[in-house]
Image (cartoon, rainbow, N blue to C red):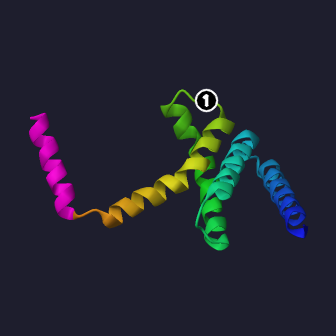
Amino acid sequence: MAEPASSIATAGAVAATVSLTALLTQLDPGAVAGAFAGAVTFALTAKDTARVPRLIYSLVSLVVGYAAVPDVAALSPIKSPFLAAFLVSALVVQATITALDRIKTASVKGVWDALVAAFRKGG
């Protein structure tokens, strides 16, 4: 029973720290809140990941989610800083891990054959 209360207290402390940091540094509070929510969503749904890598991934998710807001707003119909940061934060780490895993298992010959077939088909 002590663990859920401890987890809630920890989550509250982290949320308060992120909020205070956003206010003190004059970051966009909506984008920071969205990035934080996305990072938490990723951390809670990540499977088969130990605590330390999950924490590091969450921090990467938070930073990339916040940093991507201007690009997402410029390149998509999403104009809400909160929503843009949330979506990027929730998806960026999983998408990156998936892409890296596929790159590791891809064969050069298979990629070359696919490129050649695509060019032949298009020409």
Q: Residue at x 54, y 56 (%)?
A: 93
Q: Residue 78 at what x, y percent from top left?
A: 58, 30
Lateral position of residue 119 relative to residue 16, left or right: left
Q: Residue 7 at what x, y percent from top left?
A: 83, 63
Mark 1 is on which residue type?
A: Lys
Magenta span: chief secondary structure: helix
Q: Residues within 10 Å of mark 1 (few under 14, many from 20)?
A: some
Residue 108 against residue 116 in the figure, above or below: below
Residue 83 against residue 12 in the figure, above or below: above
Is 119 magenta? The answer is yes
On-image quarter of the N terminus: bottom right
* Res. 67 visible in picture: no
Q: Residue at x 82, y 58 (%)?
A: 11
From the viewer's side, name the closer residue of 115 and 32: 115
Residue 3 against residue 96 in the figure, above or below: below
What is the span of residues highlighted in magenta in the rendered image? 108-123
Q: Residue at x 61, y 59 (%)?
A: 46
* Res. 111 visible in picture: yes
Q: Residue at x 16, y 56 (%)?
A: 112
From the viewer's side, name the closer residue of 84 and 10: 10
The picture quadrant where one finds residue 57 is bottom right
The picture quadrant where one finds residue 60 is bottom right
Residue on which the image places disc 1 = 79
On-image quarter of the C terminus: top left
